[in-house]
Structure formats: structure tokens, C-alpha cells
Amino acid sequence: MSELLATTGTIAAIATAVIPQQGSVNIVRVSGFQAMAIAQALFHTPGHQVWESHRILYGHIRHPQTQKLVDEALLLIMKAPRSYTREDVVEFHCHGGIIAVQQVLQLCLEKGARLAQPGEFTLRAFLNGRLDLTQAESIADLVGAKSPQAAQTALAGLQGKLAHPIRQLRANCLDILAEIEARIDFEEDLPPLDDEAIISDIDKIAAEITRLLATKDQGELLRTGLKVAIVGRPNVGKSSLLNAWSQSDRAIVTDLPGTTRDVVESQLVVGGIPVQVLDTAGIRETVDQVEKIGVERSRRAASAADLVLLTIDAAAGWTESDQEIYQQVQHRPLILIINKIDLIETASMITLAYPNEIDQIVTTAASKNQGIDNLEKAILETVQKGKVQAADMDLAINQRQAAALTQAKISLEQVQKTIADQLPLDFWTIDLRGAINALGEITGEQVTESVLDRIFSKFCIGK
């Protein structure tokens, strides 16, 4: 049995991020049949407070042998099945910092709990029927959300917006399977099977699967974000563009070429999509060893970026150096940024030459915070051209779910081929069962230990 599935006993873990001198509260979470006994051994309440479910108690945590005071704290009690794991759960709400919360966790372990494995609280919630697998994954997405839209999508998944259509598709497949198997077992007692109706039903299921699969790219953007690299010659205004865009002074701006020696990063949100913006060193030939390292890092950042913002100086126009940089990055999705337009006459823009194949062009005056809105619109247009834009932003599948849906669709296509080849009914059921199993993997109705290992090992210890 996998290590993650060994979920016997009582578990404990710190359920909040422990950062020195930051955060006013830290929580130790305990789940299992010994949770209440551990709490009663460690937590002492003044007065006549009632130890009942869904009540918060005030008191002190003391060492059970020495009675030494460890912390002044609150205790939250949640008895089974009305808890996150559907087991008895207690939470010690301690003061922030490292020492107190670690001491409380150690006392819980000494009283019989064991340290929880990554994601084990949520795994127990899944195994005890409180969550399906899509909801469990949505919790991880919610914790790691990088934008309000990503958080909203995760919340929709937690509320079952993905699980419901998947269960309906699986139920439809089961209905078709029942029709077919009834003809196999009671052929003489039932009317002939309507092949056209079966094919039509499968077409409808496959179409819905295709609709769900169309949300994968949008889901990846919401979860992982978009990596954007600002590249160009020295002194074309790349750092000014980053500062104007991020509304901060992340990058040093001077009139001296080569000021930026390394990649400067900023995290933004554009149209609900997390964007990691990289301001790179100006790309040019140089004998300065430090600047040469920065230029090489700029080239690597551009090669790894999802989108390149090639920035040029409007006054200088398209130079030979710009052309050389363009040849290095033209294999990536690209937007041309014509910066410093405030320094030229409007008529000069008409004669500005650049490669005809560049179809996304934005003019900016970064030093005056002009053109940023148009830049963000161009980025969203590029994303929508290059990736499938989800029609329903509240629903976005992940890679695991997409793989299972793809397998289900392939199985259904094979069923249709089997019907077209006029093979016996027994053959129809083989791939139909494959589709049912694949759909069951998404919600957890059909799931292997290795899949659970892969999913829950990505969670933090206390979740």
C-alpha cells in the first residue's frame, strides 16, 4: 500500500506558514480518534467552558508532565463528521512565531499523534467522502491561486462545477452500457438495439467532452501564469516600461546604456491572468564581463518566455541591432513595442520601418505612463489567438483531468468505429467501459493509488 494511503491513526501538523516575526497567529491542526484526548491533555481552560463541537475555548497550553506554560491560546473543536476530514479535529490557535507553535506540535506528537504527510488532511477528506477528487484539486488551486480569477475558478471547482458535468457524462455512458448489456443477456425478450440512437448519444457525450477539453489552456494560464520578457537594445526604455507597468521603481532607469545588468522580475495580473514580467539587460555586443553575463541571461529569458515584448526606440527607428535581436526571438510569440513616441513627430511614425510579419504593435511613452492599457489589451489578444479561450471562465480543467477526458473521448470514438464495423455487442462494451473508467478517474470514483500519490504529494503538510 502506498505511503499516502496509510491514513490510520491521529495526525498533526502546523497548518499555517511559519515566518519569523510575521503573522500574529499560527495553527496546529490535529485529526483522528485521539484528537480530543490530546487536546484535553494539553489545553487547560479557566472557568466552566463547555467542551463541545464547533466551539472555541480560551485557555493555556501546558506540558502534560511538568505543567510548564507553553502558550496562551484558543482551541477550536470540530467533532466527526462535521469537520474537514470527517474525523474529530482540534486546532490550537497559538501566537505567531516559530517557537510556540513548534513546541505545541511536538507535544501533540508526544501524546500519540504522528506528523501528517503532505496533503493528508485533504486525502482523508476525500477517502471519507467529504470531497471528490476535483474538489480536492480545487483546494490546492485555491491555496496556490495567483490572481482573483484563478481563485474564483478554484472556488467554482470546490463547489462542484466541474464534478457535476463529469458525473453526468459518466451516468450517460453507464445508461448506454446498461442498454447494450441488457440486449446481450435478454436478447430475445427486448426489441432490437437502436444503433443510430446509440451513436447520437455518444456524439453528444463526445461534444461535451470536447467543450470541457477547450478549457485546459485557460486553466493552465490561470494556474501557472504567463511569462513575459521585455527585450531590446540598451536604452530603449525597457526598465521604464516595467516601472510604468508595475507602477513601481523595480528597475533602475538612467540615460546610460547597459544600466540593467541582470533580469528584473515583477508579478502582475492582466485580465485575470497572472503575468511574470522580466525586464532583461539590453542585448548588444560588449567587452564588459558583467554586462556580457547579463546579455546572455537576457537571451535565455527570451527563449523561455511565453511572450516576448520586443522594444525599440521610436526616435532611432528600426536599426540593424533591432533586426539582429528580432532574428533571435522571432520564433516566440511577439509584440513590438515602439517606445518614446512622445519624443517624435506624429508624421515620423508613418515612415517607421519594421518587419511586415509583425502584426501586434503597441506604441508607448513609458516615462509618461502612456500606452500601458493598449499593451495589456494586445497581450490578451495574443493569448486568445494562440490559445483556446475558455467560454466559461469558472471552469478550467488541469492536465490530469485533460488526460482522462482525452482517453474517454478516444474510447468513445472506438465504440463508434466498432458499431460501424458491425462487430458483436460484446465488443461495444469494452471501450465503453474504458470511457466510464476514464471519467471516473477525474472525480475519484475510479482511481489508483499512484494517482492519489501524485495529486496529494503536491499539497503542503498542513492541508
Image: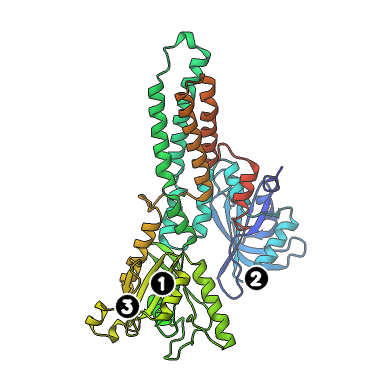
Query: For mark 3, what is the residue?
Result: 364
**Disc 3 residue type?**
Thr
Marks 2,1: beta carbons within 8 A: no
Residue drawn at (32%, 70%), measured in percent from left and top? 361
Q: Earlier in the sequence, mark 3 or mark 1?
A: 1
Q: Earlier in the sequence, mark 2 or mark 1?
A: 2
Query: For mark 2, what is the residue?
Result: 98
Query: For mark 1, what is the residue?
Result: 309
Seen in the image, is 164 located left or right of residue 97?
left
Q: Where does residue 407 sit, x and y in percent of width and height?
A: 52, 39
Q: CA distance from mark 3 to mark 1?
A: 12 Å
Q: CA distance from mark 2 to mark 1?
A: 43 Å
Residue drawn at (32%, 77%), measured in percent from left and top? 364
Mark 3 against mark 2, which lies toward the viewer? 3
Residue closest to the eye, 371 or 336: 336
Q: Where does residue 78 sit, x and y in percent of width and height?
A: 57, 50
Q: For residue 29, what is the image quadrant?
A: bottom right
Residue closest to the eye, 394 or 421: 421
Seen in the image, is 362 located left or right of residue 212?
left
Q: Earlier in the sequence, mark 3 or mark 2?
A: 2
**Disc 2 residue type?**
Ile
Q: CA distance from mark 3 to mark 2?
A: 48 Å
Q: Where does residue 12 sit, x and y in percent of width and height?
A: 66, 55
Mark 2 against mark 1, which lies toward the viewer? 1
Please rate how many residues cluster around mark 1, counting C-alpha atoms within 10 Å: few if below 14, some from 14 to 19, many from 20.
many
Residue at far right of view: 65
